Image: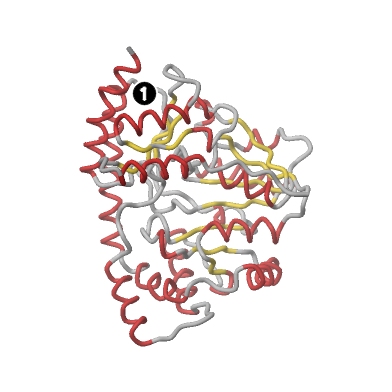
Amino acid sequence: MQAEIEPFQAIAISRLAHALKGEGRSIIHMEFGQPSTGAPRAAIAAAHRILDSDGMGYWESPALKSRLARHYDETYGLEIDPDRFILTCGASPALVLALSSRFHPGDRVALARPGYVAYRNTLKALHMIPVEIACGPDDRFQLSAVRLAALDPPPAGVIIASPANPTGTIIAADELAAIAGVCAARGIQIVSDEIYHGLSYVEPARSMLEFDPTALVINSFSKYFSMVGWRLGWLLAPPGHLRRARAYVGNLFLTAPSLSQHAALAALDSHDELQGHLAVYARNRSLMLDALPRLGLGAIAPPDGAFYIYADIRHLTDDSLTFCKDLLCDTGVATAPGVDFDPVDGRHFIRMSFAVSTTEVVEAIERMTPWFAARAG
């Protein structure tokens, strides 16, 4: 039986944005969660050297896995066997790998609503059942141990994201510990998407592995390391699951791109440059938060990390997709409709990414302010 997968509406918005740009319109792309900066300079230089000297092939870099292990020691105080890192072509294949190798068709997997569109749709594509838990302002739009403990029967698994997409909210350490406790007691496998780690504005995000050593952890070089197009991520699997996960990755995806692995090794040592990107995002976040009252957007999720504003627009519309299209056509500012992240209440929300340049953020605010005022009027 074929799974029915909803389209990713932000992609449709982006197509429209590029069509308008082709007509000569000035477009500011705030619809996708991708940094406007490129890979670190050292990563690009490493790639040039490899292109000139190595024919490359199917390969998994021992040096990169060892460096990732050191990264986990330095960042989280965790000693990880480098062999536990399975390199993938970005975080999306890592998600497919985690779900397909750990769960069975028909298994129920819990996740927050709102949440990243691909969680729900990947589960459906693999013939699993997403159990979406409505999370609102009182929950800081995040799953909690109490909500997981109340599920009857318990799901086979749960997807945790901290910082989260589309909200940017971070789950505090004590709550992560409580979630881990509930899952251990109820036999719930944790899949932790940590792709936005490194992008925090209040306190550093904690890895679920600090609280549950059996968690399946997904991460990528796309966000903090600003290497979206290089398509390189990883799945950190517990020792008892490695053999099965490696069998799946070898058959489904072969290996991650060799060139990207060489570049990523250099990127891991580009701390100062990457922290400079974070400083730009922090400035953009501040500008957006200052502007929201002028836009009439008072109800937002607290953007603790990542680079998103998830704003409630129910006082203006109950059709966020049409709203985003109108905003784009009238102002040239592309945003993402909340229906991607929440099929029930998302019609009342939009997501704006501030991972663009500060100049673009300032221009976007100038364009949107009178437009939102006219809508409110």
Q: Quadrant of the C terminus?
A: top left
- Residue 96 is situated, as x and y percent measured from the top left of the image, at 62, 57
Foreground of the two, 35 or 16: 16
For the point 44% across and 31% down, the residue is 350
Front-most of 367 and 234? 367
Residue holding disc 1:
297
Nearest to the observer: residue 247 or residue 18: 18
Q: Is residue 82 above or below residue 190?
A: below
Are there few (<14), some (14-19), or many (20+) residues within 10 Å of tag 1?
A: some
Q: Residue furthest front?
A: 23
Residue type at mark 1 is Leu
Q: Give coordinates of residue 334: x percent, y percent.
A: 36, 38
- Of all residues, the one furthest to the top in this rendering is 377
Please, which colouring scheme is shown?
secondary structure
Q: Position of residue 265 (x, y in %)?
A: 39, 73
Left or right side of 246 for 363: left
Q: Position of residue 51 (x, y in %)?
A: 36, 81
Looking at the picture, tell me which residue is in the foreground, 327 or 202.
327
Q: Is residue 91 above or below residue 300?
A: below
What residue is drawn where x is 41% and y is 47%? 33
* Secondary element at image label 1: loop
Q: What residue lies at 51% left-to-right and 53% top-to-bottom?
A: 207
Q: How many marks?
A: 1
State which quadrant residue 305 falls in: top left
Q: Quadrant of residue 149?
A: top right
